[in-house]
Amino acid sequence: MIEVSARRGLFPKTLTVLKRIFETVKSLLQALLFPKVCIICRCASKDDICSECIKKVTVSPKRHDNVQDIYPFGSIFYYGKYSGELKKAFGRYKFDGEIWLGAAFGRLLYNSFREYFADYSALLYVPASRSGYMQRGFDQCKEVAAVIAKLSGLPIMDTLVSAKVARKQSRLGFRTRQENFGRFVLKDISDFEMQKYYRGKRILLIDDVLTTGSTVRECGQLLVERAGAERVDVMLIATGRADIKPF
Ligand SMILES: [Zn+2]
């Protein structure tokens, strides 16, 4: 009996690892064979979304400043509406293991908002939950943020940590005791980093899709109240909310 349950426990994990390896090899081959493809139809394209597919997505890259009801700690940037082909492409990224799409989403955000990055001292991302990371094998916002960091030259910080991950790794010195009420905690920040990147500074937080806003509110609040940031703007691939105009 013990052997059977052990096997049962092992099998899905092995499958996840094999799937991950398969997707990585596929992504590498794809990158080698097709230097750049449209994220929607996969045609060879100089842009991440080709001229035909761009007509099928509702794209409206814009900074939204009057969003206090949804997010009181800064402005919200988003690339497009979470529907149709953009939603499908995001689903292939987050749920079907097409990790290569992360870099494309990062480029789309960077190219849409390149004039704003000089305003920030650091780039942070909403970390994947422990279960999400275990299922997918990668952190979807981190992949996107890493590309934006590379293109913009902003330092990328892993200061925000999923509370469950932090509890598992409490020996690493996370401040879990005082912050164990939410889904996220802040890693210890050195005085040097605090002065250079956080206290009184503007931070840019990368998330994937905006729905209720509770995730970014919690992260923004931690960074403003605990790390002393002046403001924390949020940059998203898409929003499912109709109350942030225009689409
Ligand atoms: Zn296309």
Image (spheres, grey):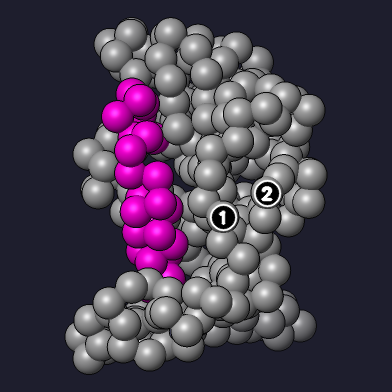
Q: Which residue is mark 2?
A: 246
Q: Could you tell me if residue 61 is visible in this image? A: yes
Residue 173 left/right relative to 78 = left
Q: Is residue 110 magenta?
A: yes
Question: Looking at the image, which residue is at 41% across and 79% down?
Answer: 50
Packing grade of label 2 (10 A; few <14, some 14-19, many >=20) is few
Helix, strand or loop at disc 2? loop
Task: Say which amino acid is labelled 1.
Answer: Ser
Q: In the picture shown, does residue 112 fall above or below 223?
A: below
Residue 46, located in which quarter of the rendered image? bottom left
- Count of numbered tags: 2
From the top left corner, tell me how far across and down residue 15 is, in percent.
Answer: 54, 84
Residue 218, located in which quarter of the rendered image? top right
Question: Looking at the image, which residue is at 54% across and 38% down?
Answer: 63
Question: Looking at the image, which residue is at 55% across and 77% down?
Answer: 55
Q: Which mark is residue 137?
A: none
Q: In the picture shown, does residue 34 fall above or below 58?
A: below
Which segment did they paint magenta? 97-123
